[in-house]
Image: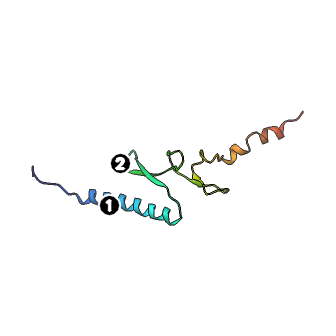
């Protein structure tokens, strides 16, 4: 056993599942006409989480957007997008004030 190579069916299946998941996701993204790289990070319990790589800033992000005014793709930060609560912040406070 000292000079033997160990092949575990569970480890092999885990590796195949990860590779298949990435391949299928990449194919689906390309089918939508989007050219975005993917990366992974380890989770606490030895799993993996997939991320997009923003085409502009190269940071890993969970969501990418396509600009409504151009063909630009990027993360919320690169495209200057704000959450709804951020866009309307201050409006409610100003309208409630009574002189």
Name the quadrant of the C terminus: top right
Residue 98 spot, x, y in % from top left: 88, 35
Q: Secondary structure at mark 2?
A: loop
Q: Is residue 87 left or right of residue 9?
A: right
Q: Secondary structure at mark 1?
A: helix
- For label 2, the residue is 46
Disc 2 vs disc 1: Cβ atoms closer than 8 Å? no
- In front here: 7 or 51? 51
Q: Is residue 31 left or right of residue 16?
A: right
Q: Residues within 10 Å of mark 1 (few under 14, many from 20)?
A: few
Q: Is residue 64 left or right of residue 23?
A: right
Give the alpha-carbon distance from disc 2 to disc 1, as whole Å.
Answer: 15 Å
Residue 36 spot, x, y in % from top left: 49, 55
Question: Which residue is situated farthest in the bottom direction here?
Answer: 31
What residue is drawn where x is 37% and y is 62%? 20
Residue 52 spot, x, y in % from top left: 49, 52
Query: Is 54 rendered above or below residue 8?
Result: above
Question: Which residue is situated farthest in the right direction here?
Answer: 99
Residue 32 spot, x, y in % from top left: 53, 65
What residue is drawn where x is 39% and y is 44%? 44
- For label 1, the residue is 16
What residue is drawn where x is 31% and y is 57%? 15
């Amino acid at each position: 056993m000292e000079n033997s190579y160990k092949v575990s069916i569970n480890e092999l299946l885990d590796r195949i599942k990860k590779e298949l998941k990435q391949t299928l996701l990449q194919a689906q993204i390309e089918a939508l006409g989007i050219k975005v790289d993917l990366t992974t990070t380890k989770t606490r319990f030895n799993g993996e989480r997939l991320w997009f790589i923003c085409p502009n800033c190269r940071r890993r992000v969970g969501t990418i957007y396509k600009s409504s005014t151009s063909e630009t793709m990027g993360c919320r930060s690169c495209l200057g997008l704000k959450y709804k609560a951020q866009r309307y912040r201050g409006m409610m406070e100003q309208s409630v004030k009574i002189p």
